[in-house]
Image (tube, rainbow, N blue to C red):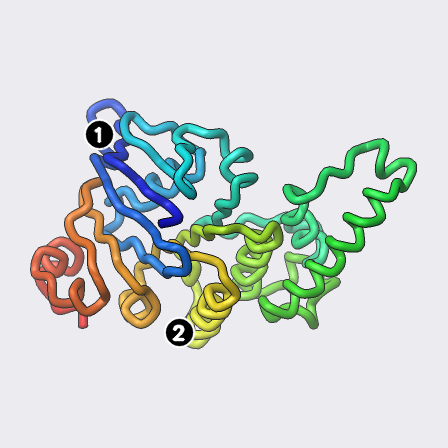
Amino acid sequence: MLLKVEALSKHFGGLKAVDGVDFHVNQGEIVAIIGPNGSGKSTLFNLISGTLRPTTGKVLFQGDEITAHKPYRVAALGIKRTFQTTTLFDQLRVVDNLAIGRRVNTKTGFWDALFRTARWRRERDETVGKVLELSGIIGLGDKFFDFVTTLSQEAQKRLAIGIALASEPGLLLLDEPTAGINMEETAEIIELIRKVREAGTTICLIEHKMRMVMGLADRIIVLNYGRKIAEGTPQEISGNQVVIEAYLGGKSIA
């Protein structure tokens, strides 16, 4: 078990955005979190990644409690995330963005850079190697020196995943990785996610495209009004009447 969430809640005044949620993610899995708009999915990611402090409950990663850790500490432990709205350094190039994503793995400081110490040279070479490798994995090798503003929305989503992967996380949180792109582009992102999992990274994702989720996830967690209402395989979820009523108003998921 890589990640464990126990009775996690987040209240904003009288609003229970997340209400006593329990779930886990095993090493090597792809786990999807689904639910109607406003069901608490992104808030749950914010609690896991340290952006928000929980009202109650615990978050454990690799057996250690990380509840209410600052985001940079959570990232340093090996949990990285992307966001619904692609967040990139849009005045920089693809190579620069990937190198920034690697920064958490380096210890080079001001004096190292000034005097070009052995550590600076070693970490520079490691970063260059990793950035070149990642540009190929995410399919942007031919756009290595392109500025972010020239990239399509789909390419920017690839880059955001690449930045998250640059520090070699144990768990990758993807918040709607295919939002705003067409079906052909969605298929390309699905293949990238599969490739990332095959390379050894565990993935937990939020997604609204049900066909994508059903064909990609090992397990699915369903939220509604901040509470977990179901958990199971895609086959189990597709036939769950509670989920069908809450998520699709009674229409079949399959």
Q: Which residue is drawn at 41% across and 60% down?
A: 28
* Residue 20 percent location from the top left of the image: 21, 35
Q: Is mark 2 on a helix, strand or loop?
A: helix
* Quarter assignment of residue 134: bottom right
Residue at 43% across, 70% down: 190
Query: Which residue occupies 56% across, 39% down?
Result: 76
Three-letter amino acid code at the position of disc 2: Met
Q: Tell me which label, 2 or 1, sits earlier in the chain.
A: 1
Residue 201 rendering spot, x and y as whole percentages: 48, 58
Q: Quadrant of residue 159?
A: bottom right
Label of residue 40 in the image: none
Does residue 150 appear left or right of residue 23 in this picture?
Answer: right
In the image, residue 131 above or below residue 60: below
Q: Residue at x 25, y 23 (%)?
A: 13
As drawn, the residue found furthest toward the bottom would be: 184
Taking the view exactly as shown, the residue that stands out farthest to the right is 115
In this orientation, which residue lies closer to the viewer: 134 or 118?
118
Figure check: 214 above or below 34:
below
Residue identified by numbered label 1: 15
Question: Label 1 neighbourhood size at 10 Å, few (<14), some (14-19), many (20+)?
Answer: few
Tell me the quarter of the image containing the C terminus. Answer: bottom left
Name the residue at the top extreme.
13
